[in-house]
Amino acid sequence: NAGVTQTPKFQVLKTGQSMTLQCAQDMNHEYMSWYRQDPGMGLRLIHYSVGAGITDQGEVPNGYNVSRSTTEDFPLRLLSAAPSQTSVYFCASSYGTATDTQYFGPGTRLTVL
Amino acid sequence: QQPVQSPQAVILREGEDAVINCSSSKALYSVHWYRQKHGEAPVFLMILLKGGEQKGHEKISASFNEKKQQSSLYLTASQLSYSGTYFCGTENRDSGGSNYKLTFGKGTLLTVNP
């Protein structure tokens, strides 16, 4: 099992550019989520999904879109990157709900200039 | 709303004990504890469900006080490998079901020195 994988590991964008952060898991987990981590702020939930075709907003959803067409994949799209979106992004998955153990991917470090 | 963790940072010598607290302003359904080493992803330590249970994992244990809406993580006889940032994550459930959201605190930086 590869667990939770994220690509790319590092990315530099210019303001206004768009991109997609990829997240995949091979554990057949129903629940997947995206967090951003900023210094001194902890992990903040961006979007989450309780299964294929179902997504919902977290604490800080503005500027991000998600979709869940398969159980395995949960991409995060930045529509028009802003410097405030400079952060480390973590994808996580769990078997059923947020109550279950969350398995985190290795993270994507994004810099927006 | 983020749970509040205290202290923000703590420095220990190897073999000393530490307690990290996590408080929520809302009724708690579950509390999760994770540890993150610098430059790495958070790693699961334990989950506590409402009911006031206490769990243990080697020399790391935790308690959950439903009435006080708080949890505490106890690190006993700390080792160098315990260094890292500890996060609590809380799940609050409204009547009628889960909101499926895990909200993390800002973290507690634990440094264990030889």
Image (tube, coloured by chain):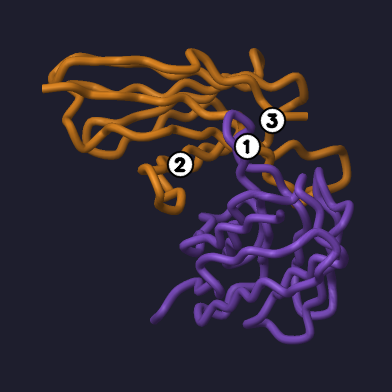
Chain colours: A purple, B orange
In the displayed structure, A4 sits above or below A113; it is below
Determine whether label 1 and label 2 are within 8 Å by CB.
yes
Residue B34, disc? 2
Residue ID at (77%, 45%): A84
- Position in image of residue A54 (x %, y %): 84, 72
Q: Quadrant of the C terminus of chain A?
A: bottom right
Q: Name the residue under label 3.
A: B28
Q: Quadrant of the N terminus of chain A?
A: bottom left
Mark 1 closeness class: few <14, some 14–19, many ≥20 residues within 10 Å = many
As drawn, is B6 to the left or to the right of A58?
A: left
In front: label 2 or label 3? 2
Distance in Å between CA atoms under marks 2 and 3 = 17 Å
- Position in image of residue B38 (x %, y %): 38, 43
Residue ID at (72%, 86%): A70
Chain identity of mark 2: B
Residue A75 sits in quarter: bottom right
- Position in image of residue A100 (x %, y %): 57, 55
Determine the secondary structure under disc 2.
strand
Q: Name the residue under label 1.
A: B104
Distance in Å between CA atoms under marks 1 and 2 = 10 Å
Residue B81, disc? none
Badges 1 and 2, same chain:
yes
In the displayed structure, B9 sits above or below B32; it is above
Residue ID at (50%, 78%): A27
